[in-house]
Amino acid sequence: MDLVLADRARCNSNAIIRLNDIRYAYPGASENALNGVSLALHPGRILGLLGPNGAGKSTLISIITGMRKAASGEWYSSAKRVSLVPQDFAFYPSLTVAENLKFFSRMTPTAAPAESLAKVIDIAQLGAFLNKQAAQLSGGMKRRLNLAIGLLAEPDVLLLDEPTVGVDPQSRAYLLNAVRELAATGISVLYTSHYMDEVQAICDEVAIVDRGVLLANGSVAELLQQQSSEVVFTLSEFEQLDWSLAPTPLLARERDEFRFACAQSNTISELCQWFTAQGAQIIAMRRGHQHLEQVFMQLTHHRLRD
């Protein structure tokens, strides 16, 4: 692997970390865990990383953090500090919240550890729980402590692996809002989750991987638009139409809006010609609304939790 630690100017498009054509295979494995994956993390933006179990997400994270070395490809970085908040709880359950934070603060090379400690306590809203044993915290509070420890190093890149697993709705809402606020300060966030609604709600960009291959990468809006196969026509003078004769089946109707599955561009053309021939007027045409989970299923042919 050609490892290049570059200044931000070399990370084109202002990316703070850029991976180009990364490949990795575990010893003895018959297939690569990663096959030519290229990604970019940008300051102040949240990149959602989606993929089923075994897709290569953990391998990719370990390469970004430097825990694994890719077999080939390039890695450009201008990040000073990269912090990983793992899915597993990374603290000592027998210690109190304050003791955990003090212990881990001594392990981080920040210029002002006392200031960093106070800052993460405020961000994670742990002030009322400092003297409580970590093992006695609720699932949501444990997630907050995990996040606080990850923030002690004052990272400019934050990797969050399933940060809302097993939390109550209130804690989940808090964590999502905290991630948004952290990104707003300029931190680059890589966010993995099995909850599609979370990714669709807070991520600026989404990357979908399966079997080590990057299947899609772009903004949420771009992916929804590119992968949508549904087209909605707004029509007038449609009363005489015999829908059984349409070039493709009608999926749904709401007043003067008619929804069709149009996986091929020629299907749209055929519909337009059919409407005109039957005397209907096309007022408008748009892509149908789609959820990120539908996009994921179209690309991988299974659900995220499979």
Image: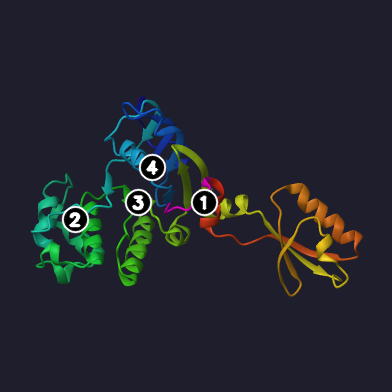
Q: Secondary structure at mark 1?
A: helix
What amino acid does circle 3 point to? Ile
Of the image marks 2 and 1, the number of the one nearer the N terminus: 2
Q: Secondary structure at mark 4?
A: loop
* Residue under label 4: 54
- Give the CA separation, mark 3 to mark 2: 15 Å
Q: Magenta-highlighted stretch: main secondary structure?
A: loop
Q: Any mark on residue 116, and which?
A: 2
Q: Secondary structure at mark 3?
A: loop
Q: Any mark on residue 296, and which?
A: 1
Residue drawn where x is 24% and y is 65% of the image: 139
What amino acid does circle 2 point to? Ser
- Give the CA separation, mark 3 to mark 1: 27 Å
- Give the CA separation, mark 2 to mark 1: 39 Å
Query: What coloring was used for the rendering?
Result: rainbow
- Mark 4 vs mark 3, foreground winner is 4
Could one spot residue 43 in this view of the protein? yes
| Boundaries of the magenta span | 300-306
Image x and y of residue 172, in percent: 34, 66
Image x and y of residue 61, in percent: 34, 41
Q: Quadrant of residue 27?
A: top left
